[in-house]
């Protein structure tokens, strides 16, 4: 989950899961006399079968599972069922609550549908889940996520109507979708709306940006923002 093997400025749930993953690696390495240098490269199915990658527990339902989701549906978008299945697994690795699992599955389905040509009206249709239920297999969405899928976020008053960009994944999903629903077809409007909800601003905007980015595409990003990012990237690299 890190290009350098080190993490910083991440949520407690993700940090705890990564630490637990490392502990499990060390136990497996010790049991089978495998060097820690080589533990990441084992391919023996008998050894892999003994390693449980889900390092979280029930009740852990933070927004960190959702903010990093996009690469999964992007990779599997031509195969919607797999995209949704692995979107759920992606979140479950660090956030063990069923709500986190289903939030990732539903949002993964929206990103997948976007890449397969769905219009914005189709994505925001209160019957989207019902119309794409075959993508979700025999695992129905839990009630909290199902309510969001049926349009609980479509509130004109936004913050005044109870939309909150908090760390709880149900709130975060609802907030990001509200920003997408109310952005008037503008990526800039949506990001600003997400941030201006307050609380966990960067994560709410990151979640919004995954779906909005997939839908609007690179060319619809505000030019001034892209130029600033390019400037700072070049400054850091040089």
Image (cartoon, rainbow, N blue to C red):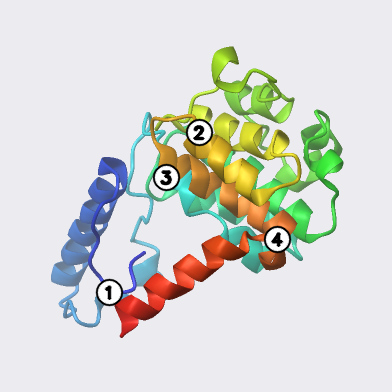
Give the distance between the C-alpha atoms of the residues marked 1 and 2, in whole angstroms: 28 Å
User: Image quadrant of residue 163?
Assistant: top right
- Crowd rating for badge 1 (residues with CA inside 10 Å; few <14, some 14–19, many 20+): few
Q: Which residue is mark 2?
A: 172
Front of the two marks 3 and 2? 3
Residue occupying the far front of the picture: 224
Q: Is residue 198 above or below residue 195?
A: above
Mark 3 or mark 1, earlier in chain: 1
User: Image quadrant of residue 40?
Assistant: bottom left
Give the distance between the C-alpha atoms of the residues marked 3 and 2, in whole angstroms: 11 Å
Q: Position of residue 230 (x, y in %)?
A: 47, 74
The residue at the point 25 percent across, 52 percent down is: 9
Question: Considering the numbered disc 1 on the image, is that residue within a helix, a strand or a loop?
Answer: loop
Front of the two marks 4 and 3? 4
Of 32 and 16, which appears nearest the observer? 16
The residue at the point 77 percent across, 52 percent down is: 113
* Left or right, 80 with reference to 19: right
Q: Which residue is mark 1?
A: 4
Mark 2 or mark 4, earlier in chain: 2
Quadrant location, the C terminus: bottom left
Q: Which residue is mark 3?
A: 202
The residue at the point 62 percent across, 59 percent down is: 222
Of 194 and 101, which appears nearest the observer? 194
């Amino acid at each position: 989950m890190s290009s350098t093997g080190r993490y910083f400025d991440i949520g407690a749930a993700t940090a705890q899961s990564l630490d637990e993953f490392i502990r499990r690696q060390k136990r497996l390495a010790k049991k089978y006399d495998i060097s820690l240098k080589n533990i990441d490269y084992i391919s023996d199915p008998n050894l892999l079968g003994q390693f449980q990658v889900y390092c979280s527990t029930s009740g852990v339902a933070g927004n960190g599972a959702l903010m990093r989701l996009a690469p999964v549906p992007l990779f599997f978008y031509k195969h919607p069922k797999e995209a949704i299945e692995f979107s759920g697994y992606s979140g479950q690795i660090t956030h063990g609550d069923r709500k986190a699992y289903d939030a990732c599955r539903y949002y993964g389905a929206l990103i997948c549908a976007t890449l397969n040509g769905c219009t914005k009206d189709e994505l925001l249709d209160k019957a989207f889940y019902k119309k794409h239920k075959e993508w979700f297999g025999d695992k129905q969405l839990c009630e909290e996520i199902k309510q969001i899928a049926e349009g609980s976020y479509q509130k004109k008053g936004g913050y005044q109507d109870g939309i909150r960009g908090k760390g709880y994944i149900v709130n975060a999903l609802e907030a990001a979708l509200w920003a997408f629903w109310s952005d008037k077809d503008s990526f800039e409007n949506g990001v600003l709306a997400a941030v201006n909800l307050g609380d966990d601003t960067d994560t709410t905007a990151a979640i919004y940006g995954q779906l909005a980015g997939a839908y609007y595409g690179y060319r619809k990003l505000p030019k001034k923002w892209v130029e600033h990012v390019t400037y700072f990237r070049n400054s850091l690299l040089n």
